[in-house]
Image (spheres, rainbow, N blue to C red):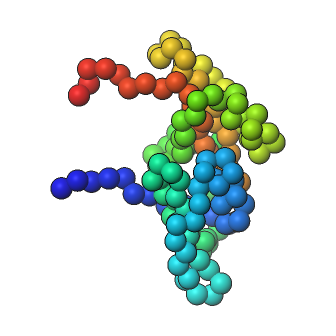
């Protein structure tokens, strides 16, 4: 039976800012809206690669601060990553919306041309933007 990745579920305080950020910089658009009642919605956002965010409204306050740098180093989700042709061009496109938490850093010792930067989305989630990553040959 074939298994494919479907979505990453997130809970956000400001759906409009979250949606606008990912639409503008990463090509996401609404794929489905489900009315949860009490003026709450569950929204699926999708990009052209078939990646979905399932976006929930919050039901409680955050019990600890958001991570910084490249994300949390304790067990759990560390960051969301997108590959682009050119990190510097993407940062220029994003302007002040690119709230950098770490980098840009080069990893040429591992992969020639690999460069990465981490930033915060409007909700404080860490987003990695990377260029030049290549799979290691001979592992399959």
Judged left or right of residue 110, residue 3 is left
Judge whether 137 appears above or below 57 on screen.
above
Residue 65 visible, this orientation: no
Judge whether 140 appears above or below 48 on screen.
above
Residue 81 in percent (x, y) is at 54, 41
Residue 112 visible, this orientation: yes
Q: Quadrant of the C terminus?
A: top left
The residue lying furthest to the right in this view is 96
The residue lying furthest to the left in this view is 1
Question: Residue 72 or 84: which is nearer the viewer?
Answer: 84
Q: Quadrant of the N terminus?
A: bottom left
Question: Residue 53 or 57: which is nearer the viewer?
Answer: 53
Judged left or right of residue 49, residue 116 is right
Tell me the residue at 39%/57% (across/down).
Answer: 6
Judge whether 74 appears above or below 40 on screen.
above
Residue 83 in percent (x, y) is at 54, 35
Judged left or right of residue 13, residue 1 is left
Residue 122 in percent (x, y) is at 71, 54
Tell me the residue at 72%/34% (across/down).
Answer: 91
């Amino acid at each position: 039976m074939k298994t494919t990745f479907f979505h990453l579920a997130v809970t956000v305080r400001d759906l409009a800012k979250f949606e606008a950020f990912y639409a503008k910089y990463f090509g996401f658009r609404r794929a489905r809206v489900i009315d949860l009642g009490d003026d709450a919605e569950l929204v699926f956002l999708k990009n052209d690669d078939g990646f979905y965010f399932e976006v929930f409204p919050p039901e409680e306050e955050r019990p600890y601060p958001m991570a910084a740098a490249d994300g949390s180093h304790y067990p759990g989700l560390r960051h969301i990553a997108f590959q682009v042709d050119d990190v510097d061009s993407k940062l220029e496109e994003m302007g002040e919306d690119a709230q950098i938490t770490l980098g840009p850093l080069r990893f040429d010792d591992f992969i020639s041309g690999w460069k990465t930067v981490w930033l915060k989305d409007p909700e404080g989630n860490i987003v990695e933007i990377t260029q030049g990553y290549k799979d290691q040959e001979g592992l399959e």
